[in-house]
Image (cartoon, rainbow, N blue to C red):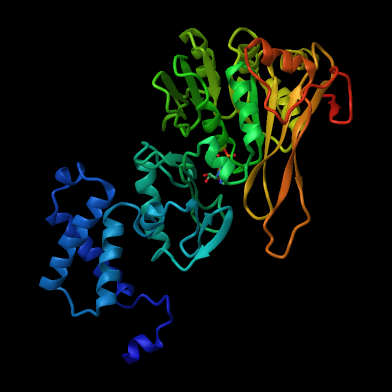
């Protein structure tokens, strides 16, 4: 081992410390390759091609390098040439769900629900800013002191948020939300997020056109479950999906995907979820699926749900079933249509049939923590009946969250709806004698 490599720390970058070497090869590489031809290749083919060309260039005119230095140099130059520099390999890594850059020296990723810091850094603030500029320029946006907060999209479609100084005191900050991978309901059972009986129940709800709200905190798996549930919608139906950032990946043939649009640089041309919900009503939908309700569009969605567009699905950010209903009420009141709070409760009572609550457990796993039915009518307080609940067992030394699902009788009114639609109740679920308050039912006054 040479003296030089012995005195270097493990993350010491050796020849790569000289940014000019990387930049020089990047420029040479871009001269050699045919960009037009490259665009037809897949990401991994592109990488292989660049690595090969660069290998030739280095052998021909480069300094003498050790094998590991040489491969690190190649990797670094190709990463930079491909666009997002040191972030490229992270984007290729399917186990990473979130990439967070907090200034040039601090890069974190989330894997399986856990956040870890990586031994990586940008060469400088400027290099990070260049990467950021490259990202935001693809959506025709600028980022600078007068425009320090930008939402953008990677060419692959992933959502990116950028916020820079002076607003971000810790340095230019980049948050990349990876596309969630698609899970089927049986796969989610495999992950312990629900059980077979719940699958049968939820599938019956979807086919019987109950309106379903999927609720949970950020990253609890709302979009993933919404996508899986959407898979049950029969293929002959016309489905319209409405999202801020198209994440849903439905498999049916007759799906129309609508996506909202932020304003352009001049602050014009904004199309909101609300505009899209309203427009969708004129498109003869059989089902409307709203990725996440966050504002006044909630009222439009509730109206749609209770006036013939039943069988709709949406997600909302909430920590419990009652919280979800309260949130819908608050969000509905953000509409510019002034509607009394009581009337909103009426709206929710007639629109919402089911709340599926998700939770992220201490071990990072995601589970349905409750399936609740709403049986209240008119202006009455919300009456919520639990039909499934996850009961956590005491935590053991391995810190894996274990427990069991408890299946409880359905309120008679809901069971009748299923029966009328020709659905059979799964074996684990009975029917409660009436819809009266019992110990699995609670009231909430929004
Ligand atoms: N049931 C699950 N088990 C394990 N991982 C999940 C589950 N549901 C979602 N995930 C993963 O968790 C992350 C967040 O999921 P997502 O559906 O986008 O959450 P949300 O919409 O609530 O923010 C994604 O990486 C996704 O693949
Ligand atoms: Mg989501």
Which image quarter: residue 294? top right
Image height of 230 relative to 56, above or below: above
Ligand 1 picture quarter: top right
Q: Residue at x 42, y 75 (%)?
A: 11
Q: Residue at x 38, y 66 (%)?
A: 123
Taking the view exactly as shown, the residue that stands out farthest to the left is 60
Horizontal side of 444 relative to 274 (left or right) equals: right
- Residue 114 location (% of width, % of height): 58, 57
If the image is split into quadrants, where does the C terminus sit?
A: top right
- Residue 173 location (% of width, % of height): 50, 53
Residue 50 or residue 352, whichever sits in front: 352
Horizontal side of 311 relative to 135 (left or right) equals: right
Residue 54 or residue 197, whichever sits in front: 197
- Residue 424 location (% of width, % of height): 65, 19
**Residue 159 visible in the current orientation:** yes
Image height of 419 relative to 248, above or below: above
Horizontal side of 395 relative to 22 (left or right) equals: right
Which image quarter: residue 301? top right
**Residue 294 visible in the current orientation:** no
Residue 430 or residue 288, whichever sits in front: 430
Q: How many callouts does the rendering have?
A: 0
If the image is split into quadrants, where does the N terminus sit?
A: bottom left
Q: Residue at x 16, y 74 (%)?
A: 62
- Residue 61 location (% of width, % of height): 12, 72
Horizontal side of 254 relative to 331 (left or right) equals: left
């Amino acid at each position: 081992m040479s003296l030089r490599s012995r005195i270097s720390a493990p993350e010491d970058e050796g020849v790569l410390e000289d940014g000019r070497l990387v930049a020089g090869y990047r420029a040479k590489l871009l001269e050699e390759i045919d960009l037009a031809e490259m665009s037809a290749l897949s990401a991994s083919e592109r990488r292989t091609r660049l690595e090969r060309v660069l290998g030739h260039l280095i052998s021909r005119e480069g300094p003498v390098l050790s094998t590991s230095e040489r491969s690190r140099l190649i990797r670094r130059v190709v990463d930079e040439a491909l666009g997002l520099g040191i972030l490229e390999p992270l984007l290729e890594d399917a186990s990473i769900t979130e990439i967070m850059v907090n200034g040039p020296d601090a890069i974190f990723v989330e894997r399986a629900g856990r956040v870890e810091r990586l031994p990586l850094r940008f060469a400088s603030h400027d290099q990070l800013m260049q990467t950021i500029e490259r990202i935001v320029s693809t959506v025709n946006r600028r980022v600078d002191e007068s425009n320090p907060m930008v939402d953008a999209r990677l060419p692959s479609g992933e959502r990116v948020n950028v916020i820079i100084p002076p607003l971000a005191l810790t340095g230019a900050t980049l948050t990349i939300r990876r596309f969630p991978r698609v899970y089927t309901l049986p796969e989610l059972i495999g992950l312990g997020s629900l059980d077979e009986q719940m699958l049968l129940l939820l599938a019956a709800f979807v086919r019987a056109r109950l309106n379903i709200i999927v609720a949970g905190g950020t990253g609890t798996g709302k979009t993933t479950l919404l996508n899986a549930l959407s898979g049950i919608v029969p293929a002959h139906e016309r489905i319209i999906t409405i999202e801020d950032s198209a994440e849903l990946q439905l498999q049916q043939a007759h799906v129309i995907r609508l996506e909202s649009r932020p304003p352009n640089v001049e602050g014009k041309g904004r199309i909101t979820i609300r505009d899209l919900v309203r427009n969708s009503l004129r498109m003869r939908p059989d089902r409307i699926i709203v990725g996440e309700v966050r504002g006044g569009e909630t009222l439009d969605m509730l109206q749609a749900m209770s006036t013939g567009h039943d069988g709709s699905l949406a997600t909302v950010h909430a920590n419990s079933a009652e919280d979800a209903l309260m949130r819908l009420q608050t969000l509905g009141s953000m509409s510019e249509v002034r509607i009394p709070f009581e009337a909103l409760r009426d709206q929710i009572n007639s629109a919402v049939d089911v709340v599926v609550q998700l939770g992220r457990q201490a071990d990072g796993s995601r589970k349905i923590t409750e399936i609740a039915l709403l049986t209240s009518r008119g202006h009455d307080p919300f009456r919520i009946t639990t039909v499934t609940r996850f009961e956590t067992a005491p935590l053991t030394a391995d810190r894996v969250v274990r427990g069991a699902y408890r299946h409880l009788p359905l309120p008679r009114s809901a069971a009748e709806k299923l029966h009328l639609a020709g659905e059979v109740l799964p074996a684990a679920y009975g029917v409660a004698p009436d819809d009266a308050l019992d110990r699995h039912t609670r009231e909430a006054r929004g």
